[in-house]
Image (cartoon, grey):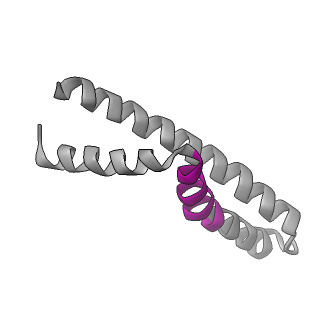
Amino acid sequence: MLKSAETWLEGWGRIREKGVWRFIFWRGLLAFGLPFATLISILDFVVDDRPFEIRGFLIRLLVGGSVFGALSWRWYERRYRIHQSTRS
């Protein structure tokens, strides 16, 4: 197995030990959802001249971030299992 694959497996192993909810919060809500909601809110204001709405911002943050985090977790878990099965 390539060294980079070994490194990835070790890194993902440490992340997955912390749990899915922590991953969704940090990688989904904060790392993806917050910038996503901010960007869309800015575009709404610049392109459509709509005022900032906290409700729309929070919906984008929570839905976008949660979906992204959950799908990312699922994707990484699938890769992890495939690598683990070829490893042994």
Picture coordinates of residue 14 (x, y %)?
36, 50
Residue positioned 75% across, 69% down in the render: 41
Considering the image in quadrants, where does the C terminus appear? Answer: top left
Main SS of the magenta part reads helix
Snapshot quadrant of residue 67:
top right
Number of marks in picture? 0
Snapshot quadrant of residue 6:
top left
Picture coordinates of residue 39 (x, y %)?
66, 69
Picture coordinates of residue 81 (x, y %)?
34, 29
User: Does residue 45 belong to the magenta stretch?
Assistant: no
- In the visual, does 71 lie left or right of 11? right
Query: Taking 37 as reference, is 4 above or below it?
Result: above
Snapshot quadrant of residue 2:
top left
Considering the image in quadrants, where does the N terminus appear? Answer: top left
Residue positioned 67% across, 51% down in the render: 64
Query: Taking 11 as reference, is 56 above or below it?
Result: below
Residue positioned 55% across, 63% down in the render: 31
User: Does residue 31 belong to the magenta stretch?
Assistant: yes
- In the visual, does 28 lie left or right of 13? right
Q: Which residues fall within the magenta stretch? A: 21-35
Picture coordinates of residue 32 (x, y %)?
57, 59
Residue nearest the viewer, comparing 13 with 28 = 13
